[in-house]
Image: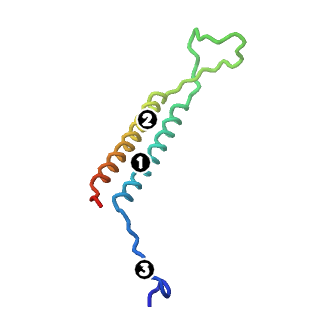
Amino acid sequence: MSSLGAGSAPVEAEVDEPAVRGAKAMWTAGLATAVGIAVGVVMVLQRRKVACADGTFFPEGETDFKCFSHPQALVGTATIAAFIGLGALVYLASIVIKLLDSRSEPLK
């Protein structure tokens, strides 16, 4: 007697392994891209209070005479650009793989 119960036949699930692996890879790469962009944004937004240079212009009526530096702005911007490029590359590669996979199916 089957463990599925009386009168029920076992159903074999047809799993398309390359499609499942491709979907997992796409989600993993998308998550990595999102994390990389978030890290880049945090790097860009970090700032340090520094001594103002002589001759620093402050608008009339200014009450806050603090000067700030963004030491990681260039690296953060480059990180954002690199991860956007990585995300685009993975997305385009997934489109190509899906296209090639659909072309390789036999005619029915």
Work out whether mark 2 precedes mark 3 in sequence or the reverse, and give the earlier one.
3
- Residue at 39 percent across and 59 percent down: it is 20
Which residue appears at 54% of the width and 24% of the height? 69
Q: Position of residue 36 (x, y in %)?
A: 46, 41
Q: What type is the residue that disc 3 sits on? A: Pro
Q: Decide which of tag 3 and tag 1 comes sooner along the chain.
A: 3
Kind of residue indicated by mark 2: Thr
The residue at 41%/48% (across/down) is 29
> Which residue is disc 1 drawn over?
29
User: Can you identify the residue that label 3 sits on?
Assistant: 10
* Mark 3 or 1: the one toward you: 3
Give the mark toward the camera: 1 or 2. Answer: 1
Q: Taking 99 as reference, is 29 left or right?
A: right
User: Residue, x 41% and y 41% (percent of image)?
Assistant: 87
**Which of the two discs, 1 and 2, labels the residue nearer the N terminus?**
1
3 lies left or right of 93? right
The N terminus, quarter of image: bottom left
Toward the viewer: 81 or 44? 81
